[in-house]
Image (spheres, coloured by chain):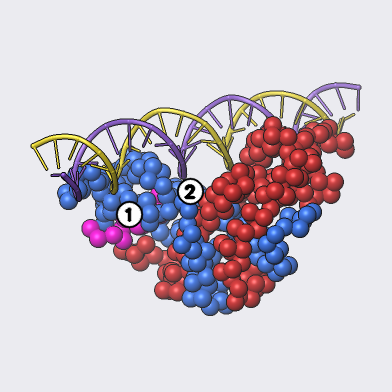
Chain colours: A blue, B red, C yellow, D purple
Amino acid sequence: MRPVTEPAAPPLSADEEALVRTLARVMTVLPKLMDHDLRQDAGISLTEYTTLMHLSEAPDRQLRMNELATACDLSLSGMTRAVARLESDGFVRRIRCDTDGRGWEAVLTPEGLARLEAAYPTHLRSTRQRITDNFADFDLAALTRALDRVSCPGTTPI
Amino acid sequence: MRPVTEPAAPPLSADEEALVRTLARVMTVLPKLMDHDLRQDAGISLTEYTTLMHLSEAPDRQLRMNELATACDLSLSGMTRAVARLESDGFVRRIRCDTDGRGWEAVLTPEGLARLEAAYPTHLRSTRQRITDNFADFDLAALTRALDRVSCPGTTPI
DNA sequence: AGCAGTTCCTTGCGCGAGCAAGTAAGCTGG
DNA sequence: CCAGCTTACTTGCTCGCGCAAGGAACTGCT
């Protein structure tokens, strides 16, 4: 914004302004791009891919709904519906948690694992092309640390 | 994903993997955080703020629907509805384009400008806290260049 | 034991977005 | 000049998501 009245906080420098604009663009466009790549070439949405991925990495390939939602940065209700879709496709099964009768475990089925493996090359290619290739000459660890601060600065109000 | 069968493309190194995971998190969470900040403290959605911002910076504070949609990274139909909301709030007026009878110009009203100015400090604060503060020790120009490549590598299929 | 409070998940609802089809206006070649 | 194509935008439909409310199961206090 080109401020008409001067605000209280110090306004952004030109460099900062450019970064913020670009990052705003990235954060709106990148999810769409990745989702589009996956749907186009692997017939799966980004949310579903992410869900299957986290399940595949969990012990016994199963997770509580709770943990799954947190891992995928989805609300609990969003995860309920995502798992319902995956379950109707046979990629996930749901079993009651044996240590807590309120809880459910989402379990990756063999079909789900196969689906994930089928989509993996697409995701990898998309990831390389869209992300890592563009940061080849960066200190990746430092960048990752900074981005980590972005996504959860303690003041995460969601 | 922890690959079970080895894919064709070279898999990610540990550093790359970490970056990709973190960036995935950022790209899903950051829009929600910024939107939440604005709604909470300024009573406006991120989409609406962005729309008003771009209008405020345009010559005569007006833009064709087309250009506005592109600037805000929204589909044309999404922008139609966004402007409809803003119009019903009195923040935007729509006039026919005088050089092309098919076109519409979205015009920022004085109320809309006031609304934008009122929300600006919130947006600035959110921006500083969520973004620039976390990249204080970075070469912002280089980072911006890299992120620019992320959001539009020519192969933007949307 | 039993009741209050908490936790885990699901359901009802509304919103915001994209896609595809529709409409209206401009353009172009015969 | 008008028939057919193109362009600019809107509308109908559907989907995915978050929020708030609900229900079921666990826990703790008495």
Mark 2 — residue? A39
Q: Can you give x and y, in whole percent of width and height, for residue B16 in the image?
A: 46, 71
- Respond whether the residues carrying marks 1 and 2 are from the same subunit: yes
Q: Can you give x and y, in whole percent of width and height, for residue B61 in the image?
A: 81, 46
Q: Secondary structure at mark 2?
A: helix
**Residue at position x 45%, y 48% in the image:** A45
Q: Secondary structure at mark 1?
A: helix
Looking at the picture, which amino acid does disc 1 mark?
Glu
Q: Can you give x and y, in whole percent of width and height, for residue B39 in the image?
A: 58, 46
Q: Chain of mark 1?
A: A
Task: In this rendered view, identify the residue nearer to me: A42 or B143.
Answer: B143
Looking at the picture, which amino acid does disc 2 mark?
Arg
Looking at the image, is D19 positioned above or below residue A29?
A: above
**Residue at position x 69%, y 37% in the image:** B86
**Residue at position x 17%, y 51% in the image:** A99
The first of marks 1 and 2 along the sequence is: 2
* Cα–Cα span, label 1 and label 2: 25 Å
Q: Is residue A151 magenta?
A: no
Task: In this rendered view, identify the residue nearer to me: B47 or B100.
Answer: B47
Is residue A86 among the parts visible in the rendering?
A: no
Mark 1 — residue? A67
Task: In this rendered view, identify the residue nearer to me: A42 or B130.
Answer: B130
Looking at the image, is D28 positioned above or below residue A16?
A: above
Q: Which residues are magenta?
A: A48-60
